[in-house]
Image (cartoon, rainbow, N blue to C red):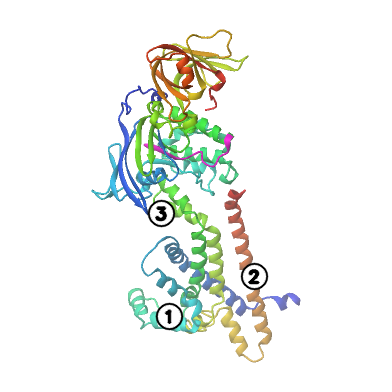
């Protein structure tokens, strides 16, 4: 009886799996550009750096609905980018789970960049110079020295971004709508239940589920980051 | 292959094999102005010597390609590394220079073995074991750099630089920040290493004792300019440089070869190139090993004949080459001696010189106490 009460319904499973898939894809597509932008901001000086930095932080301070609307304008089938994607590749993002991943990724991007940038800035440039004197070119320095030493920050940034994408609501519902099985993630499912009279108990279950998933991802990141840091910190002994 | 580096004949400014590195560099850094032309001989250790702030490290950075010069060039062998006129600036990772910085700069996420092999080409594998043995780091290979002492970390950094098979090794004050005992230990490793490897070394330092222990050539840098350049043994004989090269503790060096050891008294007998012998505190070197003895100018006494019943263990037959008033000490003369073809300096009171009626050209016995030799290097 108790088990049956706790067991998740198909709709709940669907929402969870969809949420994880969308958040995972969101982090997947922003990881490389996010690290690249973080590296640019941490290690290079160029014109317009302050502007880029400001633009990056926009999703953090704008209402998510605005971001969703802007995505719709640019990536919609008639948007400047969306038109190109549709005609060139037959891709249409609005009202699809891929679109929800794009929305989540855009919202999570600044968090990822911030965390990664901080950890890249903490890497001693003297070590990078030393690698150069040993014959390593820029790429080898990046992949063997800079990134490995920034792993704790990379992990933190990834988990933060994942959590942010998982909890994304405003931009998702605006850009990708609330389609069951396609774009109805946990927050959207929860919202739908709240809107439905008599579904308070089901809403509460999703609420608890969200908390559990968030806690699990935080704990996982903490554990991974600690393991990575342990190796690096042996130098301080 | 070993030893050649240390057998350059006196009188020659450059080793016969030519020059390893030639540069002429100008750079303005704030109010500081660096303008130096320098050649590094193809063999032996060249010390880049000067006080802190004299521009040694700036020069090293320009040679390494870490900074760009305002004008001038750097040539390594036949290869131009930098030339402002031809707009050449070879990036640091293609310069084939082995650089060891003041801090070891080991990669904290690689074990010692990983650090050592980081820049090692396949063809370097054969040298790995020898070099690890030579540097005494065999037992550290599986450790992470955080678990190394300062001296161990420097040795690993030196090995790492050498395993890239560089054409020139640059050492930027490698002993800085180590305490006395570790400093001596690392220096003795360095001395042994520079004897074994067939590679020109540019050694930045501001410590005269360190340089006397390791260098063959010297480039003296003051306020961004090269003020003296040549064989260290020659420069050590110059009175005008005494102030720079040790002052009160100035010294000269004698080249010798280990003959045998007296274990009972912990003494080692060495022979000079003219056949005269010296007894010095025991050295951990095999018979036949060429060594260099640093003799402080205040550790040499003169006598007309070897005295009887004296504690002096060493009396070298010498000829007085020059007697000049000391720039260091108003009561003293600096006496330059020829011991065979080698030269030696002694600082004596003017009173003693007058009473003994010392004169240029006269034979004399140079007395040196055995315990005055610093055999730790």
Can you tell which of label 1 and label 3 is closer to the viewer?
A: 3
Residue at the far bottom in the pictured view: A197
> Does label 3 lie on the same chain as label 1?
yes
Rendering quarter of residue B202: top left
Residue identified by numbered label 2: A215
| Distance from the alpha carbon under mark 3 to that under mark 2 | 36 Å
- A113 left or right of A204 in image: left
Q: Which residues are magenta?
A: B165-180
Q: Main secondary structure of the magenta part?
A: loop
Subunit ID for the residue under disc 2: A
In the image, residue B179 lies in the stretch drawn in magenta: yes
Residue B305 appears anywhere in the view: yes
Residue at 44% over, 55% down: A142
Residue identified by numbered label 3: A139
In the image, residue B340 lies in the stretch drawn in magenta: no
Can you tell which of label 3 and label 2 is closer to the viewer?
A: 3
Q: Secondary structure at mark 3?
A: helix
Residue at 43% over, 43% down: B119
């Amino acid at each position: 009886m108790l088990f049956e009460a706790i067991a998740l319904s198909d709709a709940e499973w669907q929402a969870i799996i969809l949420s994880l898939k969308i958040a995972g894809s969101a982090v997947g597509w922003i990881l490389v550009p996010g690290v690249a932008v973080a590296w640019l901001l941490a290690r290079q000086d160029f014109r317009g750096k302050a502007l880029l930095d400001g633009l990056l932080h926009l999703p953090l301070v704008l209402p998510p609905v605005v971001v969703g609307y802007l995505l719709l304008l640019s990536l919609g089938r008639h948007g400047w980018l969306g038109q190109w994607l549709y005609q060139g590749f037959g891709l249409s993002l609005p009202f699809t789970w891929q679109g929800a991943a794009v929305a989540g990724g855009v919202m999570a991007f600044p968090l990822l960049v911030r965390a990664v940038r901080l950890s890249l800035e903490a890497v001693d440039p003297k070590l990078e110079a030393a690698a150069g004197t040993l014959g390593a070119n820029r790429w080898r320095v990046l992949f063997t020295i800079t990134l490995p030493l920034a792993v704790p920050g990379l992990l933190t940034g990834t988990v933060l971004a994942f959590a942010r994408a998982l909890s994304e609501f405003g931009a998702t519902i605006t850009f990708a709508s609330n389609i069951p099985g396609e774009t109805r993630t946990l927050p959207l499912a929860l919202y739908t239940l709240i809107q439905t009279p008599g579904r308070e108990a089901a809403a509460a279950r999703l609420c608890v589920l969200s908390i559990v998933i968030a806690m699990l991802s935080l704990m996982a990141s903490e554990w991974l980051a600690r393991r990575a840091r342990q190796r690096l910190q042996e130098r301080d002994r | 292959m070993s030893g050649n580096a240390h057998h350059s004949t006196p009188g020659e400014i450059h080793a016969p094999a030519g020059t390893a590195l030639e540069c002429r560099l100008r750079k303005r850094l704030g109010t500081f102005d660096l303008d130096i032309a320098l050649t590094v001989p193809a063999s032996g250790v060249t010390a880049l010597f000067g006080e802190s702030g004299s521009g040694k490290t700036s020069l090293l950075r320009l040679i390494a390609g870490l900074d760009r010069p305002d004008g001038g060039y750097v040539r390594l062998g036949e290869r131009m590394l930098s030339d402002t006129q031809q707009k050449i600036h070879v990036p640091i990772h293609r310069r084939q220079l082995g650089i060891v910085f003041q801090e070891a700069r080991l990669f904290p996420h690689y074990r010692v073995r990983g650090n050592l092999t980081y820049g090692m080409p396949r063809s370097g594998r054969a040298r790995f074991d020898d070099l690890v043995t030579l540097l005494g780091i065999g037992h550290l290979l599986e450790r992470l750099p955080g678990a190394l002492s300062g001296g161990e970390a420097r040795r690993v950094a030196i090995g790492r630089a050498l395993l890239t098979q560089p054409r020139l090794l640059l050492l930027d004050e490698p002993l800085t920040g180590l305490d006395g005992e570790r400093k001596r230990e690392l220096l003795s490793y360095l001395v042994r290493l520079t004897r074994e490897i067939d590679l020109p070394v540019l050694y930045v330092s501001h410590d005269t004792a360190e340089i006397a222990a390791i260098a063959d050539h010297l480039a003296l840098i003051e306020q961004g300019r090269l003020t003296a350049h040549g064989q260290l043994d020659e420069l050590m004989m110059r009175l005008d440089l005494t102030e720079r090269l040790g002052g009160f503790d100035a010294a000269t060096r004698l080249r010798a070869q280990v003959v045998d050891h007296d274990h009972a008294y912990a003494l080692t007998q060495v022979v000079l190139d003219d056949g005269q012998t010296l007894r010095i505190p025991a050295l951990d070197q095999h018979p036949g090993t060429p060594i260099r003895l640093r003799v402080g100018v205040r550790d040499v006494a003169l006598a007309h004949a070897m005295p009887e019943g004296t504690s002096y263990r060493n009396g070298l037959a010498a000829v007085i080459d020059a007697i000049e008033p000391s720039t260091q000490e108003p009561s003293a003369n600096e006496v330059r001696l020829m011991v065979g073809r080698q030269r030696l300096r002694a600082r004596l009171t003017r009173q003693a010189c007058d009473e003994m009626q010392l004169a240029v050209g006269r034979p004399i016995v140079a007395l040196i106490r055995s315990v005055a030799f610093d055999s730790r290097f």
